[in-house]
Amino acid sequence: MNNVNNLNSSPISGFSALCYVNFIIKKKYRVDSIAQKMRIATDTLYRYIRGENIIPPDRIINLVSATGDIEYLEFFCEPVGYIPIKLNRTKLNKETRERDEIELSIFLGKSLESVERAFANGKISKAEYKEIHSLLTKVQEKAGELKEKIKREVA
C-alpha cells in the first residue's frame, strides 16, 4: 500500500508520491476542488502533489477531511503497526448495524478466500500478499468501526 516511494525512479517519493498517484495518475480527485475544500490555493496543492513543497502535518489533516480518503492515514499508521479507524458519530440502529455486520462478513469471507487461494500452490506471491493485506486491513477497519459504534451505545 505504501509502495509508492519509487514511482519509476521519479524524484517524487513518500507521501508526495502517494498524492501524485491519487491525484494525477488515478485522477481520484480534482485538485481545484480539494484545494478549495482545504482552503488553500490550487497551485499550493499542486506543489505538494509534485513534491516541490512538503505538505505540513496540519494540511494532511485538511487533506484527509477534504478527500475522506483513509489511505493517507494508512501511509503513516501502517509502518508503525497501527490502523486508522473512522469514528462514525451517527446513531446505531438496526438497519445500519445489520449493514455493518454484512459488510464485515463479506470482507472477512473475501479475505479467507484470498488466503486459501494464495496457499493453494504452497507459496504466496507479492501480488497475493498485497491482496490479502488489503482485504484483512479492511476487515480490521470495519471491525473497529463497528466496535466504536457499539461502544457509544453502552448505557
Image (spheres, grey):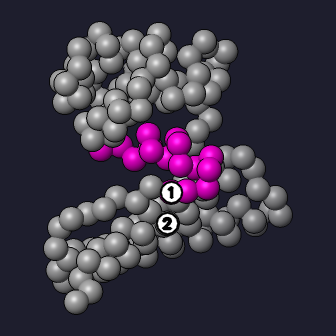
Query: Is 84 left, or right, of 27 in this rendering?
Result: right
**Residue 83: mark in rendering:** 1
* Secondary element at image label 1: loop
Residue at image position (49%, 47%) is 74
Q: Residue at x 34, y 30 (%)?
A: 59
Residue 112: image location, x then y, percent: 59, 71
Quadrant where the C terminus lies?
A: bottom left
Residue 77 counted in the magenta span: yes
Q: Position of residue 107 (x, y in %)?
A: 46, 67
Query: Disc 2 and disc 1: Cα gap in Å?
Result: 8 Å
Q: Secondary structure at mark 2?
A: helix
Badge number at residue 140: 2
Discs 2, 1 touching: Cβ within 8 Å:
yes
Dividing the picture into quadrants, the one containing residue 133 is bottom right
Q: Position of residue 130 (x, y in %)?
A: 63, 49
Q: Is residue 88 above or below residue 28?
A: below
Residue farthest along the bottom direction in this orientation = 155
Looking at the rendering, in which quadrant would you find the N terminus? top right
Q: Report the span colored magenta.
A: 67-83
Residue neighbourhood size for the residue with mark 1, other residues' Cα within 10 Å, grouped as few (<14), some (14–19), many (≥20)? some
